[in-house]
Image: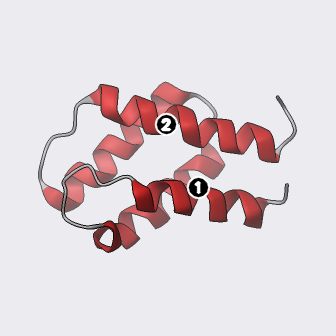
Amino acid sequence: MQTIEMNKKAVSLLEEWDPFQVGKKAYEMEIADVVSELQRLDHPTDLAKRIREIYEHSYEMWIPIENCMQISYKLIAIKYEAKCIV
């Protein structure tokens, strides 16, 4: 899987995730930031912390780290699949 395909899958997954119940199209900036972080980070905990920071910065609302960990594991799985690490 190429990086472009990985990014598309990550975007699709993040579009389905609606942590603040404001609608799927409300997170375009946050999704772009998270996909950028996915390129850089390899550990689910590190990615989960960044996801939480990104979304909290935009919405000034707290997300439980457990919720961020769930999406983080899914994103890391997409990344590993793309890099054929699994």
Q: Residue at x 71, y 56 (%)?
A: 6
Q: Which residue is labeled 2 in the image?
A: 72
Residue 2 versus residue 39: which sits nearer the camera? 2
- What amino acid is found at the position of numbered circle 1 in the picture? Ala
Q: Quadrant of residue 3?
A: bottom right
Whether residue 41 is visible to the viewer of this picture, yes or no, is: no
Quadrant holding the N terminus:
bottom right
* x, y percent for residue 81: 78, 41
Whether residue 58 is visible to the viewer of this picture, yes or no, is: yes
Q: Which residue is labeled 1 in the image?
A: 10
Q: Secondary structure at mark 2?
A: helix
* x, y percent for residue 39: 65, 51
The earlier-in-sequence mark between 1 and 2 is: 1
* x, y percent for residue 11: 54, 62
* x, y percent for residue 84: 87, 38
**Label for residue 48?**
none
